Image (spheres, helix red, strand yellow):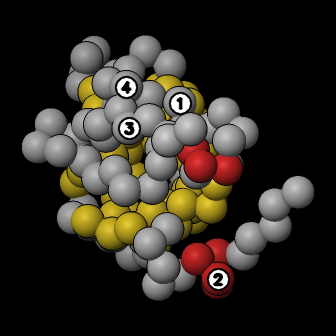
Amino acid sequence: MIVRTTEEITGTDRDVAAGHWRSKRIVLGGDRVGFSFHETTIEPGSVNEFHYANHVEAVWLIEGTGTLTDRETGVDYPLAPDTMYLLDGHERHTVTVDQGIPMRMLCVFNPPVVGTEVHDENGVYPLVSVDA
């Protein structure tokens, strides 16, 4: 059994920030459960381009509002608390956060991230395997 709090993760190597986002990585590949689980916060007023070419991501929005744009189709989706989106087709996407409060979300990745990943110039997390 694993029990963790975001308080104990804050300020450790599981607390990763880059650009306009911060990811508290609660469950990682090294935990050997087949997925990773993160609390991610994105700054208000920011525009963020992402592309998970190597991962499927599910997102549950907790706080904040904004827009999700599917860059493959040009379709916009409103984001608000209690909204879920699933990037099951490795879609290139943009998350635009409204002014006011940060967007806070819970994210699941498969395959799991190991904790060191940050988005490259194309918004992609590299595929990093967990040592046996």
Confirm whether residue 60 shows in the render: no
Residue 126: x and y, percent?
29, 37
Whichever of callouts 4 and 1 sits on the residue coming sooner in the sequence is 4
In the rendered image, which quarter is residue 36 located in? top right
- Check whether the beta carbons of the residues at disc 3 and disc 1 lie within 8 A of each other: no
**Looking at the rendered structure, which numbered label has been put on residue 111?**
1
At label 4, the amino acid type is: Asn
Crowding at dot 1, Cα within 10 Å, few <14 / some 14-19 / many 20+, comes out as some
Contact (Cβ within 8 Å) of mark 4 with mark 1: yes
Q: Could you say whether the residue bearing mark 2 is in a helix, strand or loop?
A: helix
Q: Pick whichever, 39 or 72, lies toward us.
A: 39
- Label 4 vs label 3: CA separation? 9 Å
Distance Cα–Cα, label 2 vs label 4 = 29 Å
Q: Furthest residue to the front?
A: 132
Which numbered tag is attached to residue 63? none
Q: Position of residue 16 (x, y in %)?
A: 38, 67
Front residue of 96 and 108:
108
Amino acid under label 3? Val
- What residue is disc 3 on? 128
**Spatial separation of the CA atoms under disc 2 and disc 1:** 24 Å
- How many tags in the picture? 4
- The residue under the point 53% across, 81% down is 10
Question: Which x, y percent locates residue 108?
Answer: 60, 42
When the figure is inspected, residue 70 is found, relative to residue 1, above or below; the finding is above
Where residue 32 sits, quadrant-wise, is: top right
Q: Earlier in the sequence, mark 2 or mark 1?
A: 2
Residue at point 43% right, 15% down?
Answer: 89
Q: Which residue is mark 2?
A: 8
